[in-house]
Image: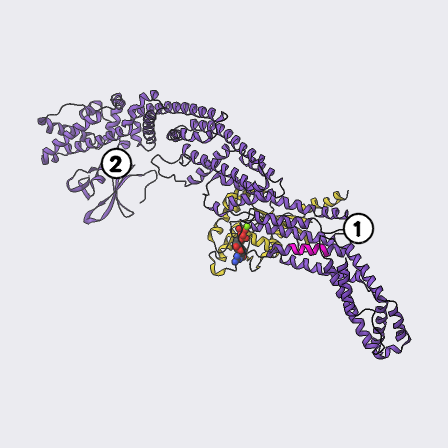
Chain colours: A yellow, B purple
């Protein structure tokens, strides 16, 4: 089975963990407990293919930025999350994106821009169009989600899997296919 | 306002024009005076042809060319500014130069007596008029070619030259004032006055610039002792004066820098700067090495911080060096870093060792906290000290008068300079902490304790207000990630041992409870208190992954002697209890699942092992049921040979009450043999058996009543007999 290394990035409190846990475990986490670093594995079927997603949920706070380079190096696809209720979290993504491109040394990196907490429309400060514009500028997919109301959560990860497939079809598969044979021996 | 390319405004002042219109007069570097209104360029005059007058009464300024005069009114300062700028720009544009003799007429210290004054002034004025009166710059330039050595000499000595000139000029001024209208009328004299004033102002500025009083000490700099407070104060004053003087060279007007005397003076000052830098570097280097030796001397604890105090008095010099001699500065930083990085490595190493040797599980938090506090204290002190001592808070690109550099990147640069220096000072700190953590993790819950401790320090409420710019926080964050990985690893290790526990259980006569469940209970007992202060989410995640894996492990576990139903019954029962005790909402689904599987196992076990103690009777009635289902009436079934009263009576005789009791005893012993003591489920299972028996019994009884009414047939035991038998058996064992 092909493995997909996905990294969830964004400022603290935007709902990175909530989205990840909603996707992996189907639960909404109400309490805010700042993440240090959590990794999850989840098997899903995308377009008839079984995929093993390895999702890394990261810290959003300043002092952990030193870790990011390594996350970016190892990740194949990235979820860039902001909260539609906090402008600064939206503004922070530009730097993150640049860092990813720098680390990956390419412009073509599987990525989804996510405006989370769309259930809180009354508190919205980042317009949907603003998000769409930024995604356009990033040349990546844009989705507004709600980890709480389960809106477009799975789609974020599925889309990323499709992007990774499109960018590097099968190459990983070949490597993986050898493994079971080795084990048999 | 727009300017032609290469042309810049030298000065710009607001004036009030004809009819009080608000305009601006601008002197441009091209040598033109321009009048603007708003952004409109109204008109311009070449200053070397037109005549600018700034000495008119009532704050008037005028420009005169080709017989036409325009006038404005402005402040005195603006007038002075205009006249100076006009001087400045006409110098560069000037093709004239005064001869030494001509200059002499202006500068030589000939005594002027009152009678001569008018004549003298007139003379001067005429000369100047001939030569273009505003060309004071030209005069100065000439002065430095011919009389340059003299000026230079005077500058060096801090001479009274300026004063003398100023005396002379003020005399002239007084005289011209005395002369009143008569002299004013003579344009030559007036222009001479303007020129003299401009010249004086210019010279005064040059003196202010290059011959500040603090520069007087330059020659004795070598002899100054940096070891004494007084010596340092003098050296610092001289150093600062040197710095500001030399800094101004960048912004000095070109014509000033053309003056030989000025150039010479600047060279001399630069030499003095180099000598001072060298002396400072030598002294600071010695001081650093001395303190380093002291710090390396064993048995001097706390020497680590003492050097801050001792070095503090040199901070202004370090700041100066950073500005004036980057190489010397860099070299000193290197010496400092080389020394103290070793001292701190040793100090932190010792603290880690001490913590390691006295590490007991219940003290992990305290010991780790102490080390972290020490590390934070050392780092924060060091950061504060270095920021100040090495002037990291000052952008070297900033100009000396403290105005911010254009780039705006000052802040980011300072932050990265600080980070780099701190990283150089503590190159092994992170690794030291990680090594300590690895040691802490040897204790079964060490990783959890370390995570709780670091999580609290790095992400806890107390951590929020301890400044983002602290470098120590980056190190602690890295350690927190290491601790988190360690804790996750310890859970992964637990997960990996689950199949091992199943294998272990297979060696025992009875399966019983897999050891991983009591371990989970123990883990929760320990961890709930470890994480009472936070990081609940991590704990819940571990519970979820452990419990999920346990359900799967139990579900597929086999035991050579214990039936599968009992393995499930006992383990799901216990796991269910454990999950309930955790009270974690994320485990709700698992709680229901374990309960379902436990109930299911009990049902299957009872069905399978209780079996049908009255099997033949049961079979008999199954036949009866079939016959009834096929159309026979219940009360008529007894007329069929196979289901006659006689046949039933013979069957019932096979099950005397005593025999049934004995069968129940045997069943009890089997159940007892299967079940483990630790679980205490015997009563539960026995009760389920009793219920099962009762259900079968009641069903048979109602069949007998329906099909064989009045035949006097009854099951070997009454309902009460059964209840008594079950409780008797349970009590006996
Ligand atoms: N209303 C709402 N709250 C959310 C949503 N996602 C996350 N949150 C809340 O926002 C807070 C921070 O979420 P978290 O996932 O821990 O943020 P992270 O720091 O990015 O991992 C928590 O209190 C969550 O309950 C969402 O989609 N809607
Ligand atoms: Mg999080």
Quick check: can you spot residue B96? no
Helix, strand or loop status at disc 1: loop
Image coordinates of residue A120 in percent, x first then y, are: 50, 59
Image coordinates of residue A87 in percent, x first then y, are: 46, 53
Where residue B467 sits, quadrant-wise, is top left
Residue B520's place in the image compared with B645, above or below, is above
Chain letter, disc 1 residue? B
Left or right placement of residue B151 versus residue B505 in this view: left
Instruction: Name the residue carrying label 2.
Output: B85
Residue B491's place in the image compared with B223, above or below, is below
Chain letter, disc 2 residue? B
Give the residues in magenta: B569-578
User: Majority secondary structure of the magenta segment?
Assistant: helix
Helix, strand or loop status at disc 2: helix
Query: Does the segment drawn in magenta span residue B573?
Result: yes
Where residue B265 sits, quadrant-wise, is top left
For label 2, the crowd category at 10 Å Cα-Cα, with few meaning under 14, some 14 to 19 and many 20 or more, is many
- Give the quadrant of the C terminus of chain B: bottom right
Left or right placement of residue B634 versus residue B130 in this view: right
Q: Which mark is residue B316?
A: none
Instruction: Name the residue carrying label 1.
Output: B560
């Amino acid at each position: 089975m092909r493995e997909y290394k996905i990294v969830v990035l964004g400022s603290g409190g935007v709902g990175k963990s909530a989205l990840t846990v909603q996707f992996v475990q189907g639960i909404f986490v109400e309490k805010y407990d700042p993440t240090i670093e959590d990794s999850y594995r989840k098997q899903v079927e995308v377009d008839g293919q079984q995929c093993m997603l390895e999702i890394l949920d990261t810290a959003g706070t300043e002092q952990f930025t030193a870790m990011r380079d390594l996350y970016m190096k190892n990740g194949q696809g990235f979820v860039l999350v902001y909260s539609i209720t906090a402008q600064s979290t939206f503004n922070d993504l530009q730097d993150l994106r640049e860092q990813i491109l720098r680390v990956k040394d390419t412009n073509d990196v599987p990525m989804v821009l996510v405006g989370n907490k769309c259930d809180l429309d009354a508190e919205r400060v980042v317009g949907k169009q603003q998000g769409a514009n930024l995604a356009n500028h990033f040349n990546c997919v844009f989705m507004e989600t709600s980890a709480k109301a389960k809106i477009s959560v799975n789609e974020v990860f599925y889309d990323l899997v499709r992007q990774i497939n499109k960018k590097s079809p099968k190459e990983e598969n070949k490597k993986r296919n050898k493994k079971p044979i080795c084990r048999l021996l | 306002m727009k300017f032609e390319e290469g042309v810049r405004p030298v000065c710009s002042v607001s004036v009030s024009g004809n009819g009080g219109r608000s305009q601006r007069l601008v002197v441009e570097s091209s040598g033109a005076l321009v009048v603007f209104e708003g952004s409109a360029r109204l008109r311009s005059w070449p200053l070397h042809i037109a005549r600018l007058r700034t000495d008119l009464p009532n704050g008037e300024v005028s420009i005169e060319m080709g017989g036409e005069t325009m006038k404005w009114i402005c402040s005195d300062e603006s007038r002075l500014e205009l006249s100076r700028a006009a001087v400045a720009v006409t110098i560069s544009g000037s093709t004239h130069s005064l001869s030494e003799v001509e200059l002499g007429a202006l500068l030589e210290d000939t005594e002027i007596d009152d009678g001569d004054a008018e004549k003298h002034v007139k003379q001067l004025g005429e000369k100047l008029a001939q030569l273009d009166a505003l060309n004071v710059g030209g005069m100065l330039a000439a002065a430095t070619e011919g009389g340059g050595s003299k000026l230079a000499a005077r500058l060096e000595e801090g001479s009274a030259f300026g004063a003398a000139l100023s005396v002379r000029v003020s005399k002239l001024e007084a005289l011209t004032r005395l002369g009143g209208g008569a002299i004013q009328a003579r344009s030559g004299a007036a222009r001479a006055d303007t020129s003299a004033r401009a010249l004086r102002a210019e010279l005064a500025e040059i003196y202010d610039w290059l011959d500040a009083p603090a520069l007087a000490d330059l020659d004795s700099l070598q002899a100054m002792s940096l070891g004494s407070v007084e010596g340092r104060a003098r050296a610092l004053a001289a150093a600062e004066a040197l710095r500001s003087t030399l800094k101004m060279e960048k912004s000095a007007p070109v014509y000033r820098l053309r003056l030989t005397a000025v150039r010479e003076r600047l060279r001399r000052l630069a030499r003095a700067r180099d000598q001072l830098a060298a002396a400072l570097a030598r002294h600071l280097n010695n001081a650093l090495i001395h303190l380093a030796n002291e710090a390396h001397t064993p048995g001097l604890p706390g020497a680590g911080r003492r050097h801050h105090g001792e070095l503090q008095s040199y901070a202004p010099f370090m700041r100066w060096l950073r500005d004036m001699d980057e190489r010397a500065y860099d070299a000193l930083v290197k010496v400092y870093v080389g020394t103290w990085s070793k001292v701190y490595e040793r100090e932190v190493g010792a603290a880690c060792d001490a913590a390691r040797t006295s590490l007991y599980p219940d003290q992990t938090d305290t010991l780790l906290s102490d080390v972290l506090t020490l590390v934070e204290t050392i780092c924060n002190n060091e950061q504060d000290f270095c920021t100040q001592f090495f002037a990291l808070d000052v952008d070297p690109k900033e100009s000396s008068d403290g105005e911010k550099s254009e780039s705006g990147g000052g802040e980011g640069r300072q932050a990265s300079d600080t980070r780099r220096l701190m990283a150089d000072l503590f190159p092994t700190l992170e690794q030291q902490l990680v090594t300590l953590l690895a040691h802490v993790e040897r204790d079964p819950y060490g990783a959890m304790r370390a995570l709780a401790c670091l999580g609290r320090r790095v992400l806890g409420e107390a951590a929020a207000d301890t400044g983002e710019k602290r470098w120590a926080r980056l190190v602690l964050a890295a350690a927190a990630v290491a601790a988190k990985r360690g804790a996750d690893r310890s859970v992964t290790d637990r997960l990996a041992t689950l199949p091992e526990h199943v294998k272990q259980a297979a060696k025992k006569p009875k399966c019983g409870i897999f050891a991983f469940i009591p371990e989970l209970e123990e883990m929760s007992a320990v961890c709930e208190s470890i994480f009472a202060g936070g990081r609940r989410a991590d704990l819940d995640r571990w519970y979820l992954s452990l419990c999920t894996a346990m359900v799967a492990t139990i579900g597929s576990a086999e035991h050579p002697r214990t039936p599968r139903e009992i393995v499930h019954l006992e383990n799901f029962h216990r796991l269910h209890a454990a999950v309930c005790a955790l009270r974690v909402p994320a485990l709700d689904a698992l709680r229901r699942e374990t309960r379902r599987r436990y109930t299911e196992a009990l049902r299957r076990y009872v069905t399978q092992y209780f079996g049908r103690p009255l099997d033949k009777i049961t079979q008999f009635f199954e036949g009866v049921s079939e016959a009834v289902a096929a159309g026979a009436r219940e009360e008529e079934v007894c007329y069929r040979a196979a289901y006659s009263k006689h046949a039933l009576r013979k069957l019932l005789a096979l099950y005397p009450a005593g025999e049934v009791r004995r069968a129940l005893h045997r069943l009890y012993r089997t159940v007892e043999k299967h079940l483990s003591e630790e679980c205490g489920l015997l009563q539960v299972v026995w009760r389920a058996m009793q219920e099962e028996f009762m259900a079968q019994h009641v069903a048979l009884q109602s069949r007998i009543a329906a099909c064989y009414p009045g035949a006097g047939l009854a099951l070997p035991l009454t309902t009460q007999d059964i209840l008594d038998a079950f409780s008797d058996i349970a009590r006996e064992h």
